[in-house]
Image (spheres, helix red, strand yellow):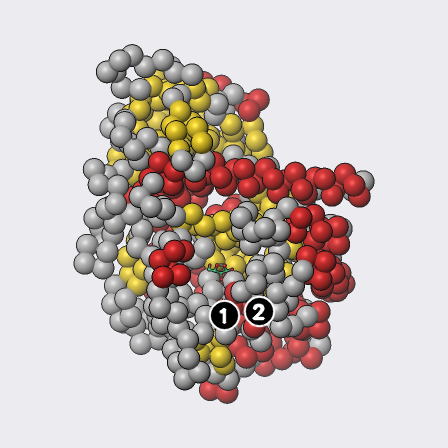
Amino acid sequence: MRASEEGAMPTARGTVEPTTTIGAIDRRVFGSFVEHLGRCVYTGIYEPSHPTADADGFRADVLALVKELGVTAVRYPGGNFVSGYRWEDGVGPVEGRPRRLDTAWHTIETNEVGLLEFTRWLERVGAEPMLAVNLGTRGVQEALDLLEYCVIDSGTALSDLRATHGRREPIRAKVWCLGNEMDGPWQLGHMSAEQYGIKAASTAHAMKLIDPDLELVACGSSARSMPTFGAWERTVLEHTYEHVEFISCHAYYWERDGDLASFLASPVDMEGFIAEVIEAVDEIKAAKGSDKTISLSFDEWNVWYLTRHMEQEAITGIDNWPIAPRLLEDQYSVADAVVVGGLLIALLKHADRVRAACLAQLVNVIAPIMTEPGGAAWKQTTFFPFALASRLARGEALRVPIACDAVETERYGTVPVVDAVATRDLEAGTGALFLVNRSVTESIEVAVDVSALDATVLTEALTLADEDPYAANTKDDPERVGMTTNASAALVDGTLTVTLPPVSWTALAFATSA
Ligand code: AHR
């Protein structure tokens, strides 16, 4: 551990060695999530009357921000929404599409946007789809119909129907989620692990008869805190192991009762969660004597002030079904963004097993991008660590063991004050180091030996921090918070040095000679 003298700034030291390689980074870990929920779709990505709207009704200002965010995959259309969704409602002439009750969020779904509109938008973003099938109120046949509609070239009823809807070429969707959070009592059609395992296995089996190359995601527990967590994963995988490639993980964190220290340590919980899911997966692998390794799809993660959501007056009443109301519109602070940055470090530290992940969600709903109907779009604080990590974390991830002080936290016990992960892209000759300082009060001087990576020149040093950890970007002050150049950073004789302010997240990029 570090030895800081009385009164001196605490220090932390680390070393990156090629032998500490974790694994190749799957670009899909920089995924996000668009659910038909609140204003994510309507007045979020889509608003035909907006001054920047394109011919298809998509907001160009939002599209530009989504591209800048660097999202690589987008999960769609839910979430809880998918468990009552009929995909057929969202295709064909818009005038003929039904308005439906969405019982998950107690709203009206107009179906103005459906699969083909979403696909067109996603192609403009340049990201890959991660589509979910409804295993709540529906089953194998509807999943097969949707798959046929999407992936078959032509010559069948549903692929030809797609062509009559204006899209000849198939939708090349590889990753499919088999339902959503089916362990949750709030989920439409929720079921036991046994029931879900059987349903997911038969759906997966059938879907692979159409396309054996699909990558399928079985629902894991909807949270680590679910009473059935662990047992759910084991039972589901007993049924689905040979049929799926992924098991899902969902986690949301928020600051509780003003306990910032615990909140900043949330990534420790995420890592524990990942370790326990891997343990469950590998136990079933061993029991089955399988050669196949199942990966984790962390397809919902973020900061979400769930308690605020619970406290808000719920939309209820048989006559009260609003269209695209303001739901889950959390405003994020610097501290929230530091936690998001820390969670990204946690995901990269498990790059060998976490091969897909989705920041939930993308626009307006617990989102890095906010919009006003008819007005501006702006970046929340959480936009910055995600955009930087997506741009810089390429190639492979490497462990960075750090010797540093520890912080006592009420929720997660003693945790290291600094956490870090390194990445390098051998082909591009670049590398990056991502660091978080979880101290609420102290700056820390960090030195990390990156000589083994043949680091030559520091090319970027950016930090997210603020005198006020609760500072945020708002409609009236949309640029209050951003990344700033960290002038303390240097690369000398293969060692990166930098001072990390309290409650901060930092990205250092460098060129390598290798
Ligand atoms: O992301 C918001 C909601 O959180 C999703 O609809 C659901 O899957 C989860 O509980």
> In this figure, what is the number of numbered marks?
2
Residue drawn at the location 42% of the way across and 16% of the way down: 1
Return the residue found at the far left: 476
Residue 263 sits in quarter: top left
Alpha carbon distance from label 2 to label 1: 7 Å
Name the amino acid type tagged 2: Leu
Mark 2 and mark 1 in contact? Answer it, CB < 8 Å.
yes
Name the amino acid type tagged 1: Ala
Q: Give the label on residue 104, or none.
A: 1
Residue 467 shows in the view: yes
Residue drawn at the location 45% of the way across and 55% of the way down: 360
Residue 220, image x, y percentages:
61, 52
- The correct choice, above or below, for 351 with respect to 238 in the image is above
Q: Is mark 1 within 8 Å of ligand 1?
A: yes
Residue 321, image x, y percentages:
41, 79
Element type at marker 1?
Answer: loop
How packed is label 2: few (under 14 Cα within 10 Å), some, or many (20 or more)?
many
Residue 107 sits in quarter: bottom left
How packed is label 1: few (under 14 Cα within 10 Å), some, or many (20 or more)?
some
Return the residue found at the far bottom: 96
Residue drawn at the location 52% of the way across and 34% of the way down: 349
- The correct choice, above or below, for 160 with respect to 222 in the image is below
Instruction: Tell me: 272 left or right of 441.
Output: right
Question: Between residues 385 and 334, which one lies in front from this camera angle?
Answer: 334
Q: Which residue is mark 2?
A: 188
Question: Between residues 410 and 94, which one lies in front from this camera angle?
Answer: 410
